[in-house]
Amino acid sequence: MPFGKKNYRLMIGGLVILAVGFLVMTLDTEPYGFGFLGLTLGPVLVFLGFMIEIAAILQKPQKKDK
C-alpha cells in the first residue's frame, strides 16, 4: 500500500478543512465577498487544507500503522 492509515486520516482531515474553507467564503455577506470571511478566514482555511493534503501525501507510511 502506498499510504498508511495515518496518511488517509490526514487526507480526510485536509479535505474537510478545504470544504469548510470554501463554505466560509460563501457565507460572506459583504458585496463581492470583500468581508473578513471572504478575504481572510476562508482563504487561510483553504491554504491550511492544501498544506495538510501535501503533508499527507509526502508523509512516509510506517511499516505497521496503528
Image (cartoon, grey):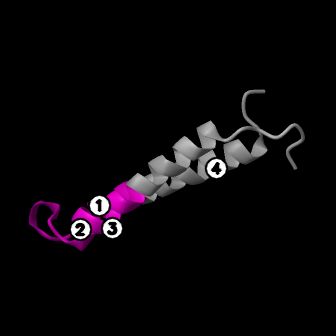
Q: CA distance from mark 4 to mark 3?
A: 21 Å
Residue 44, located in which quarter of the rendered image?
bottom left
Sequence-wise first label, 2 or 4: 4
Q: Residues within 10 Å of mark 1 (few under 14, many from 20)?
A: many
Residue holding disc 2: 28
Nearer mark to the viewer, of 1 and 3: 3
- Of residues 21 and 53, the one nearer the viewer is 53
- Image quadrant of residue 31? bottom left
Q: Is residue 50 above or below residue 25?
A: above
Residue 10: which numbered mark, if any? 4
- Tell me if I can see residue 65 in this picture: yes
Question: Quadrant of the rendered structure where residue 63 is?
Answer: top right
Label 2 vs label 4, nearer the camera: 4
56, above or below 43, in the image: above
Work out whether mark 1 precedes mark 3 in sequence or the reverse, and give the earlier one. Answer: 1
The x, y position of residue 58, in whole percent, is 61, 38
Classify 10 Å Cα crowding around label 4: few (below 14), some (14-19), many (20 and above): some
* Image x and y of residue 21, in percent: 39, 58
User: Circle 3 sits on which residue?
Assistant: 41
Q: Within the magenta stretch, is there residue 10?
A: no
Q: Earlier in the sequence, mark 3 or mark 2?
A: 2
By secondary structure, the bulk of the magenta-drawn segment is best described as helix
Asked if residue 37 lies left or right of residue 66, the reply is left
Separation of disc 2 and disc 4 at Cα?
28 Å
Ranked by sequence position, the earlier of labels 4 and 3 is 4
Determine whether, in the image, residue 22 is placed left or right of residue 10. left
